Structures are given as C-alpha cells and as structure tokens.
Amino acid sequence: MSYRVLKRKLHIQAAPTRSIVAKNLGHHQLSDVPYAQQPLFNALGQPPTLLEVNAPPSFPVVLQSSKLISLSNIATTRLTPYISLKNLVLWKPWRFLTLESTTPVSLLVTGQSLSVLTLDGSTDYVLFPRDSLLAYAGAALRLGAVRRVKGLPGFEYTLLQGRGEAVVQADGEVHKLVLDSEDEVIVSKKALVAINVQGEVDCIEPWTLTKTQVEQSQSQDVVKTNDWKHYLQQALNTLNHIKRSLLNVVSGANEYVKVKGPRTVLIQANSSTSPLFELDTENKSIRITESKLEDYASFQSQDSRDYLHYVTVQNGEVKFTSTPDFKATVDKIAKKSG
C-alpha cells in the first residue's frame, strides 16, 4: 500500500463562529434589511457554547426546540414545530421548531462547542453526528435524509445543500482543517464534525491499521525435547496471538477514515481516547512479559557448565573449574567415605 508524502504542513485554524454580515441567504437579500447588518448567527464564549441569533423580519430560522433559552419581541414572533414529511422519522422533527417574526428578533440558544457553516450554493456539507445540527436558516438551504458512507457500515451522515447558514455543535472545540488537492489525511471517525463536498460523498474511504505479521520463531519447527520449552513456546505464541487480536480489533472496528482533498474538514479536539494509544499501553505490557519469558528461556537453554564452577586449593594454588554438575565430585567423596 502506498501513500502520498505531504510536502507542506497541514493548514489548521479555528472554525468560524459567526455569520458573514450582509449576504444573500436564499431568496432574502439581507443587505437590504438594516437589522441584518448584525451577523445572523454569532457564537459566544470560549469555547463558544452560547448562540446569539439576530433574525430580520419574515426570515424563518430552524433550531432545536430544547435549546432555546431567551427570546425578544414575543408578541410579533411565531414558533411552530418544524414539520418535514421526508424527515418525519429520520430527523425527529418534534425536536426542531421554526421561528419567524414580523419584526427583527433576537434570541439565545445554548449548545456545546459551536461552529458556523456558510453555504453559497457552490459546495455542500456533510454532517456526521446526527444531533450535531443546532440551527440553520436560508430559504434555499435543504437538509437531506440520513445516509451511510459507502464501505463504512453504521457510519452515517446528513447532507446539507443550497444557500444559507447552519450552526453545528460538537463535544470538543472545533477546528478547521484545510486540505489541498494532493492532500489526504487519516481522521478518527469520532473526531469528524463536517466535511464540504460537491454532490457525491466520494472523498471518504475506510482505513485500517496495517496488521503486522509476527514472524514465527524457528524454534517452532524444532522437535521440543523438554516439556518446559514446549510450554514456554506456547505462552509466547499466546502473547503473539493476543497482540494480533488487539490490532484486529482496532482495524476491524474501522475507527479511522481517510479523507482526500481538496476540501475543508471540521474536526473536534475532545473526541474520546484513540484506540491507538490504548493499544500502545496493552502492547507495552505484552512486550515486557515477552521479554521476561524470552530471558527465562535463554537462561534455561544455557549449558550448565557456563554457570557451575568450583574452586580447589592444592599446594598453595587456587584453581577454578567449570563443570556441568557435581556428580563426579559426589562420587569421589562417596568412595572415600566408603
């Protein structure tokens, strides 16, 4: 398997937290509305967890109903459940409501770590956590049904198309990763928040860890003459099997995907611990155990004369002698005593 070598550093920056002022959102030219000189969406705080919404007259905004915490101009504002037959089951529309007022209206919406997406019609966005969409606005902004990424069972996304703005939330602080046409990166699925695409979602591919083949020791082919060597080899084989199984669990779970440029990727910095690091901890313990077993095997395989010695003193001379055992000495003593 071959990979491209990046010739530049990846371009990472903080994700946008406010709308672009005086822009066209669908059929509404906001620059013609004095109140729209304020950003439509403005995420506040560090990390941004409070969303300020400034909506011009007769401009509907869709948001999660349970997240609304403050609203101005109640008398002129209408709140209605967001009903979409296409998303009746998939998006649980009772979780969303549509806000529209005959006068300018301001409201506050609570969320987690917020980021603002701007769509001008030339590019779309795919959202990955199903509950990541907090609010959106724009008469020409369309929210698609939930789909699955090809080759990644259970990895679902929602397509956002058209012109408008949307606010997404994540567990951790959101950052923007900018990829050039020659770039490709490996990203944890749990860290993905959104990716811009053009029509088909063909920029995401499954990625698995390369399974390292552990070479079998040549001693496996040798007939084992001692039971302890046989059981020791079995223990080493078991440890190797556990190590390979851990690799298979990580790679088989498809925890990572490969994303190809050019595109913008929103990632969250506080996703759960990567299995790679958990695997490293497990492997460290396995390597220590393997090392101890191999040291023991090496010690047991030594010739006994390498570490059995005795000293004799005769005629004032000291003599060191190696011996595989003390059988000869014991026999000699026995003869003298007999």
Image (cartoon, rainbow, N blue to C red):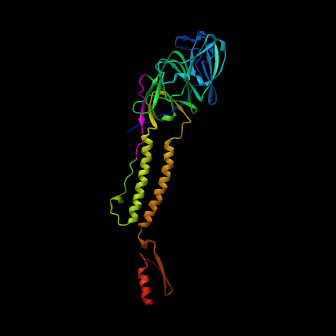
| Magenta stretch: helix, strand or loop mostly | loop
In x, y percent, where is residue 100? 59, 14
In x, y percent, where is residue 58? 59, 11
In x, y percent, where is residue 233? 40, 59
Q: Quadrant of residue 43?
A: top right
In x, y percent, where is residue 15? 56, 27
Q: The C terminus is located in which quarter? A: bottom left
Residues rendered magenta in the picture: 199-211
The image shows residue 226, relative to residue 48, as above or below, that is below
User: In this orientation, which residue lies closer to the viewer: 173 or 63?
Assistant: 63
User: In this orientation, which residue lies closer to the viewer: 5 or 67?
Assistant: 67
Asked whether residue 200 is drawn in magenta, I would say yes
Q: The N terminus is located in which quarter? A: top left
Q: Is residue 72 left or right of residue 197?
A: right
Asked whether residue 203 is drawn in magenta, I would say yes
Identity of the residue drawn at 37% across and 54% down:
216
Q: How many marks?
A: 0
The image shows residue 213, relative to residue 158, as above or below, that is below
Identity of the residue drawn at 40% across and 45% down:
211
Identity of the residue drawn at 66% across and 12% down:
75
